[in-house]
Image (cartoon, rainbow, N blue to C red):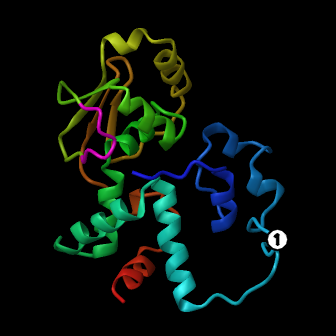
Amino acid sequence: MARYTGAVCKLCRREGQKLHLKGERCYTGKCALERRSYAPGQHGQGRKKPTEYSMQLRAKQTARRYYGLSEGQFHKYFLMAERKTGVTGEWLLRICESRLDNVVYLLGWGSSRAESRQLVTHGHFLVNGKKVDIPSYLLSAGDAVSIKEKSRESDKIKQVVEASAAHPIPAWLDLNRDALEGKVLDLPAREQIAAPVEEHLIVEFYSK
């Protein structure tokens, strides 16, 4: 599957807001958006009146980049959300939030979603006691995520766990810092999701 391998700071500049794709760097003065708050490219500083389509496209691209998803993955989640009972846009975000790599990031076990995805791929985590190395694995209410016993001796994991000591945990997740185990209490309500997107614009984009 093709994955974006360019400078991720350009993605934040393109969307005009912080997507926190570089971990701690995003909270410092080194953040590219702090230095150059305009879109990349030679026409980045030009002013354009956004069209209805461009606003819908930007909302979709922002959400996709925020979670680090390909177009195919994101559209698949939209189709899943359409089949749910309730608001499609909110279900779309719930599905994205329930990905294993995203939950690992929210538990503080990765400085960014990209790092969390890599750690999951390397097989450092258990879901309900079984190793899962698929970042897109969708968790449900009641699922428990923990760090493998062997992985707890890894210098990288130790560093990540130490850095997560002051990491705020969303209300829909529970973390036992001593046991290094997190639990999904329930799928999040919209007000518990920090994604900087207007999901109704995404629904309009795909409904054309």
Residue range of the region highlighted in magenta in the rendering = 132-138
Of residues 40 and 170, the one nearer the viewer is 40
Where is residue 114? Give x, y as percent: 50, 41
Q: Find out whether residue 10 is within the magenta segment.
A: no
Near mark 1 (Cα within 10 A), the count class, few <14, some 14-19 or many ≥20, is: few
Is residue 147 found left or right of 132 in the rendered image? right
Quarter location, residue 142: top left
Q: Which residue is mark 1?
A: 42
Where is residue 136? Give x, y as percent: 31, 47
Q: Is residue 195 above or below residue 117?
A: below
Q: Is residue 146 above or below residue 6?
A: above
Quarter location, residue 54: bottom right
Q: In this orientation, does residue 162 appear?
A: yes
- In the rendered image, the quadrant that contains the C terminus is bottom left
Amino acid found under the numbered disc labelled 1 = Gln
Where is residue 46? Give x, y as percent: 81, 80
Is residue 187 found left or right of 201 in the rendered image? left
Of residues 154 and 8, the one nearer the viewer is 8
Residue at 62 percent across and 43 percent down: it is 22
Residue at 48 percent across and 51 percent down: it is 3
Q: Is residue 200 above or below residue 49?
A: above
